[in-house]
Amino acid sequence: MNVILIAVISLGLIALISATVLYVASKKFAVYEDPRIARVAAVLPQANCGGCGYPGCAGFAGACVKAGSLEGKFCPVGGQDVMNQVAGILGVESVVSEPMVAVVRCDGSCANRPHTNQYDGAKNCAIAASLYGGETGCAYGCLGCGDCVSACQFGGIRMNPETGLPEVDEEICTACGSCAKACPRNIIELRPKGKKSRRVYVSCVNRDKGGVARKACTAACIGCGKCVKVCPFEAITLENNLAYIDYHKCKSCRKCEEVCPQKAIVALNFPPRKPKAEEASQEEVVNP
């Protein structure tokens, strides 16, 4: 009987000591979490896409609370409405961010870029890019396997069966950047959506010299520099035989589009240009 009693008392003492040690440790090593983090996370869309630049919605919520400001922070999926809610929870000023959209910078369709061979491997852009240059003479353009489509959680991008190129639905696109990260050729870029969804950009990433690029794709940028010379805002640079339009400087005057001999500069959602003869007659009426 004494043996059983001693055992029970011993176990009780061990349990008491263990509980005391655990209690002290929990207090000493306790990590305080601001309750606002949970509140901010609750209003986020929980897409965990990483488009905000943080590891998931919880990481973004923590960063917003710790920074004490929303400067430079934006949830592309939730948009401005969600950021206004976050600002209300934190009691800070809501920062208005310009809406972005994914842009496919390649016009190497089946018609513009003839195939020189046939790929018979895994239907995956990353694998194809690691194995060889692609089915055409352009080693920079779209591989057409659709990694970007698989990466998009929102169905905002699809492959056009006629052109063999991905197309972005700007009404669905959240600018999370998943498609851009998935593309091994880096042909997808996030750019401002623009007023009335109007954007001007160079739809090519080929850095080969003019003759080589044009032979591989009839719509390739040949690095002639005409767009650079005509731009009144110095928004276009030419580097490694490729023109690039800086959307921070571009005023959408479209002069570059007019002079591009390759039609490699795309101006989306603009009204059709008036014929030059019509423009001249209108000028005569205004200035008789």
Image (spheres, rainbow, N blue to C red):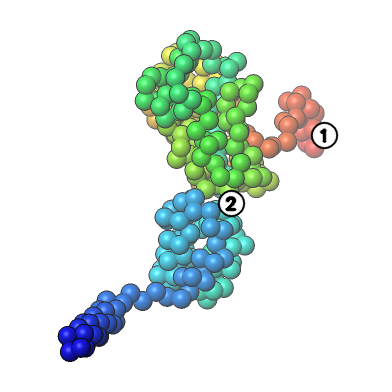
- Across and down, in percent, residue 255 comes to 60, 32
**Residue for badge 2:** 99
Quarter assignment of residue 280: top right
Q: Say the numbered circle drawn on residue 41.
A: none
- Across and down, in percent, residue 11 comes to 22, 82
The residue lying at 51 percent from left, 40 percent from top is 151
164 and 256: which is toward the camera: 164
The residue lying at 51 percent from left, 68 percent from top is 40
79 and 274: which is toward the camera: 79
Secondary structure of residue under mark 1:
helix
Disc count in the image? 2
Quadrant where the N terminus is found in the figure: bottom left
Q: Could you tell me if residue 274 is visible in this image?
A: yes
Binning the other alpha carbons within 10 Å of mark 2 as few (below 14), some (14 to 19) or many (20 upward) gives some
14 and 95: which is toward the camera: 14
Indicate the amino acid at tag 1.
Answer: Val
- Across and down, in percent, residue 103 comes to 55, 37
Q: Answer above or below: position of 227 versus 83.
A: above
Quarter assignment of residue 43: bottom right
Q: Are dots 1 and 2 in contact, CB under 8 Å?
A: no
Q: Answer above or below: position of 231 versus 218.
A: below
Q: Going by the image, does 62 lie left or right of 171?
A: left
Indicate the amino acid at tag 2.
Answer: Pro
The residue lying at 42 percent from left, 56 percent from top is 54
**Residue for badge 1:** 285
